[in-house]
Image (cartoon, rainbow, N blue to C red):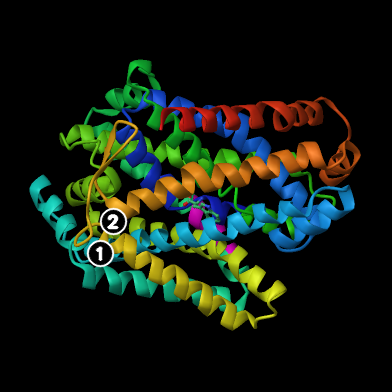
Amino acid sequence: MVFILAATGATVGLGNIWKFPYLAGEYGGGAFVLVYLLCIAFIGFPLMVAEVAVGRRGRLSPINTLRSLSEIEGGSPRWVWAGGLGVLAGLLIGSFYSVIAGWALAYMFRAASGAFEHVTAQGIASIFNNLITDPERLLAWHTIFMVMTVAVLARGIRSGLERAVKLLVPGLLVMLLVLIGYGASTGYLGQTLFFLFRPDFSSLSFAAVLEALGHAFFTLSLGMGAIMIYGSYLPRQVPIMRTSLLVVLLDTLVALLAGLAIFSIAFAHELPVNSGPGLIFQTLPMAFGKMQAGGVFGGIFFLLLVFAAWTSAIALLEPAVAWLVESLNLQRVRAAVLTGFVAWLLGIVSLLSFSQWAFSFEFAGMQKQHGLFDLFSILASGVLLPLGGLSVVLFTAWVMHRESVLDALGGADGPGFRLWYFLVRYVAPVALVVVFLWVLGVM
Ligand code: TRP
């Protein structure tokens, strides 16, 4: 139970509610969503099982788990680099994650104070633009969120937060259903379903495939050792396949519901769906402004979003903290403050990407508007996480012996195991390598 709560806390976050909808909107809906779901099923789920199993067998921080398992299984000491990659990815994602969580914090107060009541589409757009082009305000929110994150990391006690996930996920689901209800009342749910679930492959660009793959890693917190850490606390008798499946399904459910809510609101009010990272901040306030007690609902919604982001941000920076504590013998408090500080500094780069340092660039035919923020996001999800994931997949399936893997999973050699083993041995690595070759060939 604790594992499910912790892993759900780490996986359900801004990725589901903020990033999934804006990517789906940018890349034209259905085809992107289908590729994302395929990546979840055939790469994400098997990889999650592998990360948990490796973590449970190694019982150390990712870097040291890979070192010790590699030694035992007769692999190369270089596998530790996969752990190092994860630490870097965590810092990079953690940096811009905190900036966006800061937006959610700001919106929580906005919504609760009734600022969205009777607001027009232009009003909402200007509220949003005023916020993201004001670096001082963004810095304040970013700093507050980072301090919240470091405070928990420094204590290393998360049991309270984990228990709160029991309220968080149902709370988010209820709020999303309220929003979907609002969307349905405007009569645009049908169009939304078409948009999200009828794939139009002519709109499926190369960039869309890479981002769908990257997002499958991002939303499931894979490819950087975070899930491995949770695996390292998992008792032996817990069935890994079933627990991982539950976590994956919950995460996917939250994302799809968020998509339904946000696009039905966007269609109902003729708001653009391809407005990028601002999408939820420019659509949801419209619904909260129109519904009964919208201030209360809006305040609660953004509070839950901040909370979801908080539990994720803690897990994002945990690999770096764990490594500093274990390998450099740093005190936990110092390790947490140092990690938080590096992520905070890096975050300032993302924060300025929406104003002073904004520039646009073309990414495989896609116009990206937010300079280094977009670059960090693509670098992390499209390169670092898939590379980290590929390493874990190869390590599990080709370095560890079949008996050790079977033992790590604690299961019997049944059809379930064989199917999973086939996926991690062949399907996932081949798919990842093909995408990488494609990237290199195209760029
Ligand atoms: N999955 C998180 C989300 O959807 C983001 C994330 C990516 C993450 N990698 C992670 C969270 C590692 C914790 C640990 O918002």
Q: What residue sits 56% from the left and 27% below the top?
A: 434
State the residue at coordinates (39%, 31%): 208
Residue 263: x and y, percent?
A: 29, 35
Residue 111 seen in the current view: yes
Q: How many marks?
A: 2
Query: Residue 76: horizontal and vertical position, in percent?
Result: 79, 50
Identify the residue position indicated by label 2 in the image: 298
Q: Tell me: residue 231, above or below residue 399.
A: below
Type of residue at label 1?
A: Ala
Q: Position of residue 87 (x, y in %)?
A: 58, 60
Q: Which residue is mark 1?
A: 112
Q: Are marks 1 and 2 in contact (CB under 8 Å)?
A: yes
- At horizontal 53% and vertical 48% (from top left) the residue drawn is 384
Front residue (pair 99, 74): 74
- Regarding mark 1 in the picture, which secondary structure is present there? helix
Asked whether mark 2 lies closer than 8 Å to ligand 1, one says no
Element under disc 2:
helix
Residue lying at 62% horizontally and 29% vertically, measured from the top left: 42
Does the stretch in magenta take in 40?
Answer: no
Residue stretch in magenta: 162-169
